[in-house]
Image (cartoon, rainbow, N blue to C red):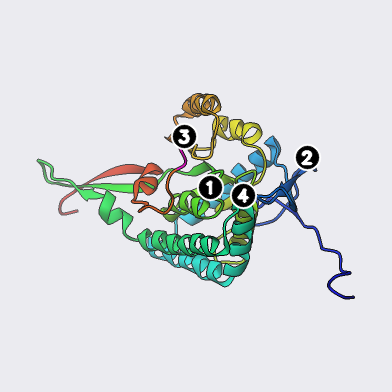
Amino acid sequence: MSPAQRLAVRKTYKLFIGGAFPRSESGRSYVVNDAEGSFLANAALASRKDARDAVVAARKAFPGWSGRTAYNRGQVLYRVAEMLEGRRSQFVDEVAAGEGLSRTDAEAAVEESIDRWVWYAGWADKVTQVLGSANPVAGPYFDFSVPEPTGVVAVLAPPDSSLLGLVSVIAPAITTGNTCVVLASSDRPLPAITLAEVLATSDLPGGVVNLLTGQVAEVAPWLASHMDVNALDLTGVDDPALATELERSAADNLKRLIRRPAVEPDWTADPGIERIAAFLDTKTVWHPIGM
């Protein structure tokens, strides 16, 4: 059959939960269009049950992931960057279509995303030295402050920057041993779903990153109020009133919080380590000298 006669295979993308790709339990999906309004694919429309399943998977993966050495986590993250590089062309196509960018600009965004992932991989075994300390005390004791992962982080991904922004909110959360549940951009989910396919075939354990697609207003309240979610990143919330409601829900179990920014951040800027520090707790240890 000639290319002109061939019908395109229209794909319905699934969720990514616990290292597998289930359909939404509701059976729903929605149409994803490119920046010009043309059909790209169908994506799963996540429900409350899907969000709960993702939190269960993230909690199950937390002990193993946080228990790995920092050096090993850095190796795993670097392997993800290698695989991102291998699928560079596909990411360029999806970023260009979803964000309405020229191919040159899309290539720049993808390259920056890969470099950003490598950057966070390099921080995995350095965070403790920078954010931890040996504290001077008036007594025969050693006193250490040690950063530790906070647990399960719910991330509402940026709505506009479909790959660079996504990487910039996922990577700092998992670098230090947290696991996460991510709600991708509803209008531009394809790079996120392709990233999930990369994660599924890398060395990252299932459940460390769980990716949902759907509507922020429908899914986010269940993540914000979930008592087994320890932290919440509101970067991807457009509606100020909804952001306030989510903050109130998050306060019920004192979740760590990154608040909704007034405008979407410049993801090409130096990220610093603020997002790494946002999802860490500090444990202080006293130990008698000579024992």
Q: Nearer the viewer, mark 4 or mark 1?
A: 4
Q: Which residues are magenta?
A: 260-264
Kindly identify the residue that appears in the image at 46 percent across and 67 percent down.
78
Label 4 vs label 1: CA separation? 9 Å
Circle 1 residue: 180
Magenta segment: does it hold 262? yes
The residue under label 2 is which amino acid type? Ser
The residue under label 3 is which amino acid type? Arg
Kindly identify the residue that appears in the image at 70 percent across and 38 percent down.
49
Kindly identify which numbered label has been placed on residue 106. Answer: none
Circle 3 residue: 260
Kindly identify which numbered label has been placed on residue 211. Answer: 4
Position of residue 14 relative to residue 232, above or below, is: below
Label 2 vs label 3: CA separation? 29 Å
Considering only order in the chain, which callout, 3 or 2, is on the residue closer to the N terminus?
2
Could you tell me if the residues under marks 4 and 1 are in contact, i.e. CB atoms within 8 Å? no
Q: Which image quarter holds the N terminus? A: bottom right
Task: Pick out the residue farthest to the left.
Answer: 138
Label 3 vs label 4: CA separation? 20 Å
Q: In the image, residue 74 lies at what x, y percent?
A: 42, 64
Circle 2 residue: 26
Give the SS element for disc 3.
Answer: loop
Dot 1 alpha-carbon crowd within 10 angstroms: few under 14, some 14 to 19, many 20 or more: many
Asked if residue 119 shows in the view, the reply is yes
Considering only order in the chain, which callout, 1 or 4, is on the residue closer to the N terminus?
1
